[in-house]
Amino acid sequence: MCRSIKTLRPPMLPEEATEEDIRAAALQYVRKVSGFRAPAAHNREVFERAVDEIAAATARLLDELEVKGVAKAAVTSGA
């Protein structure tokens, strides 16, 4: 669906995903789903809230994933 979203977990990403990485992926997802690159003024709040919620869910996912062969500390995003 969103080809510009990169995988954020080791070993696909050799270092921990940063908050910036997570937010960029969330923004790309919201852009794709909404069909808007940037929201109109009357949609800005809901657009930004969606990005924040998806970024938070992504950080939780990365924190809780267990990947075989990768140490748990390397999987956490620190976000």
Image (cartoon, rainbow, N blue to C red):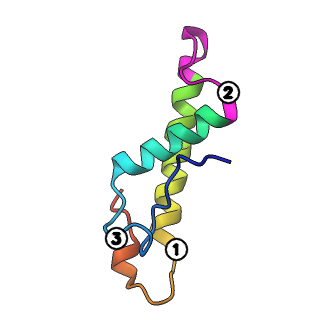
**Which of disc 2 and disc 3 is earlier in sequence?**
3
Quadrant location of the C terminus? Answer: bottom left
What's the amino acid at mark 2? Answer: Gly
From the image, state whether disc 1 or disc 2 is nearer to you: 2
Quarter residue 35 falls in? top right
**Structural distance between the alpha carbons of marks 3 and 1:** 15 Å
- Extreme residue in the bottom direction: 69
Q: Is residue 23 above or below residue 48?
A: below
Q: How many marks?
A: 3
**Structural distance between the alpha carbons of marks 1 and 2:** 29 Å
Rendered location of residue 65, percent (x, y):
52, 74
Q: Disc 2 designates what residue? A: 35
User: Do the CB atoms of the residues marked 1 and 2 lie less than 8 Å apart?
Assistant: no
The range drawn in magenta is 33-45
Characterize the local packing of mark 1: few (<14), some (14-19) or many (20 or more) Cα atoms within 10 angstroms.
Answer: few
Per the image, label 2 sits on a secondary structure element best described as loop
What's the amino acid at mark 3? Answer: Pro
Which one is nearer the viewer's eye here, 5 or 46? 5
**Which of disc 1 and disc 3 is earlier in sequence?**
3
Rendered location of residue 27, percent (x, y):
51, 37
What's the amino acid at mark 1? Answer: Leu
Q: Disc 3 designates what residue? A: 14
Q: Residue at 64%, 36% (x, y): give it.
A: 32
Q: Disc 1 designates what residue? A: 65
**Structural distance between the alpha carbons of marks 3 and 2:** 31 Å
Q: Is residue 70 left or right of residue 67?
A: left
Per the image, label 1 sits on a secondary structure element best described as loop
Q: Is residue 40 left or right of residue 13?
A: right
